[in-house]
Image (cartoon, grey):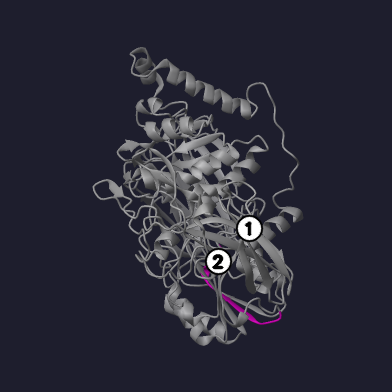
Amino acid sequence: EAYSEDPLLTGKLAAAYVRGLQSNQIGACLKHLVGNESETARDTMNSIIDEVTLRELYLLPFEIAVEESDPWSIMSAYNRLNGVTSTAQQHVQNDIVKLEWYWNGLIMSDWYATKSIDAAVGGLDLVMPGPRGPWGAKLLAAVEGGQVAESAIDDHVVRVLRLADRVGRLGGSRSWPPEPAPDSPERKDQLNRLAAAGITVLTNNDRVLPLDRQLSVALIGRHAVETIDMGGGSAQVNPPYQTSVAEGLAAILTGSLSVTDGVEVRNRAVSARPGFIVDPQDDRPGVRARLYGADHTEVADRHYDRAQLLLGFDDNFGQPIDRVVLIGRTPIGGELEVGGLGTGNWIVRSSSASFEFSVTAPEGNFGEAMLAPPSYSRSISVPAGGLIEAEWRRTPSAGGGLNAVAIVGLIARPAPRESDTVIAEAVAAAMAADVAIVVVGFTEEQETESIDKTTLHLPGRQNDLVEAVAAAAKRTIVVVNAATPAIMPWLVSVDAVLWAGLPGQEGGHAIAAALLGALEPAGRLVTTFPTDDALSPAWSVTPVDGDLPYTEGTFIGYRGHFAGNAPEPAFWFGHGLGYGAWEYTDARLRDSTHEGDIAVSVTIRNTSDRISREVVQLYFQPIESDQPVRLVGWAATTVEAGQSAEVAVSADQRLWRRWDSEANSWATLDPGGQLLLARGLGDIRARMDLPGSLSK
């Protein structure tokens, strides 16, 4: 749920996204304001951030997005900031965002984050979700009693009406240009190209990539057959389909392809993946669901693409749902893990077995219950084409009433097997092929909201799997299917590593195209990857007695590594090899066209035999020891094989400021310092001392 560890890149990406979205009269919402770096006890924890760090690092992306795109709304966070809840942050919401930045949009709360009427004084305009909440009659009484000024209410109302007007709800209208269907060839091609362009080449020893499509390939790993294309929590969307790496390679590889499932990567059960279970009425991926009210009458009989329902949250049934029957057919069959997901009483039936069980509600907050619902499952044998039926009934512990939220899901997947057996099968497949491709990664179990990671190591025995395959295969390529950094103890044992991220519904095809060179994986890392747990400038996000001090200040990520506050990382922010090879020459300061502007130019030459995209990155190292190195600009260009191009990079002047807490205002950094032209700070190509007259 973030663009980058760097404030300039984050702000620029956010601004571009907002401009595109709002050009169609669709309001954008920046989140979360502010200091929401811990998910542990996120409803109550207190982020302790000094004003310098707050201004120079954590508010800067919001400031850039507000200045460059004028977003129509911003969402405040759950956490407290320096002892005050985010929703009631007079200093941030009123003093800075609304007054100092002259922003006229609307500030809404995160869902259920507002605790009191203090937020109405502190700058919050809209409590979400509505219409019920902690304001209502209490807020009216506070206005009548003089605790909340009518002028504050006027401001909130104006901002709500302004948003309504912007999106065409005050008598106006809005329309959107025609778009290709989500599963049309045009959209598939677009999403394929975009995803591949964001895949990052981390290592490529002896230029083993791209692969010859005539080679025989052993594709290995759970993420190869169940590729994670989408995020978890609020990053989850419901696409019309998703593709796996196995599907992608099978579509374009002309050599032989063997596919071997990998070791287990999950600690808890999840609902059945679409396609593993299909609707028995029409064979569409997903399930048939029959929903019943408290009076036992059938409320709905419909298809769901996912084998998981969220009841009582933005649904329109008009009454509580107390019983659900989920029915799916499994085309594959075999020894399956089958069960139910969600608090309640369950009966699971198949042609070969039936069993009953109860699932009790977990302790924890609303977010944890939503994102990690409890479950029960067991292994049973189901024939190919067999039906699986899971019946859920609400219990008092599951909550009641029209708006009672409940998660109901059907668990169905291949039963877990012994890791040693799986690894042995993978080794045998690798030995029989020209190249082994092992796909590893995280799942939404680790990459989600409301919980924090305790490690960056891959779950399960994925590291053992990679080491065993690398020892047996002629060549080994690892694809990391994850959104966040991973520790790679096998890095020196493999020939190449691709970072796939979360590549979207065309993810499997995009990864295959990147591996075989049909499209260049031209991405750059937006996060620094440490070599092991705790070896980063800011590690612990666990509050102590409710408090989380930001003791590292502005020296997070690459800034802290470069200053020596943490060991050399495995991969620097900005790293990415692509499939080109580059020479940098004639780096120089350019004549400024505006007073105070700083720009550089450099000639780059693509010395490879392929067309390639390069991202020239400009960093500034201030002369002051208490100021970290920082990204100040970048420029991307595509160059034909053997050709050269002159690239100009302009620096963002907002990075030449420091916050003066005594004067309570911005001040210019001291003259001097150094500019660094780089392909990431692990590959600096030119250094230029900056004359004092220019740095002002």
Left or right side of 150 for 613: right
Coordinates of residue 175 in the picture (x, y in percent): 72, 33
State which mark lies toward you, 2 or 1: 1
* Residue 29's disc number: none
**Residue type pointed to by label 1:** Arg
Left or right side of 110 for 523: right
Q: What is the magenta range?
A: 214-227
Coordinates of residue 306 in the picture (x, y in percent): 56, 50
Coordinates of residue 646 in the picture (x, y in percent): 69, 64
Q: Which residue is mark 2?
A: 678
What residue do we see at 37% from left, 40% from top?
395
Local secondary structure at mark 1: loop
Above or below — where is 66 with respect to 608?
above
Q: Is residue 218 magenta?
A: yes
* Residue 590's disc number: 1
Choose top left, top right, bottom left or bottom right for residue 136: top left
Foreground residue, 615 or 341? 615
Local secondary structure at mark 2: strand
Foreground residue, 299 or 457? 457
Near mark 2 (Cα within 10 A), the count class, few <14, some 14-19 or many ≥20, is many
What residue do we see at 49% from left, 86% from top?
471
Q: CA distance from mark 2 to mark 1?
A: 17 Å
State the residue lying farthest toward the left: 545
Above or below — where is 160 with respect to 311?
above
Above or below — where is 603 with respect to 165?
below
Foreground residue, 507 or 246? 507
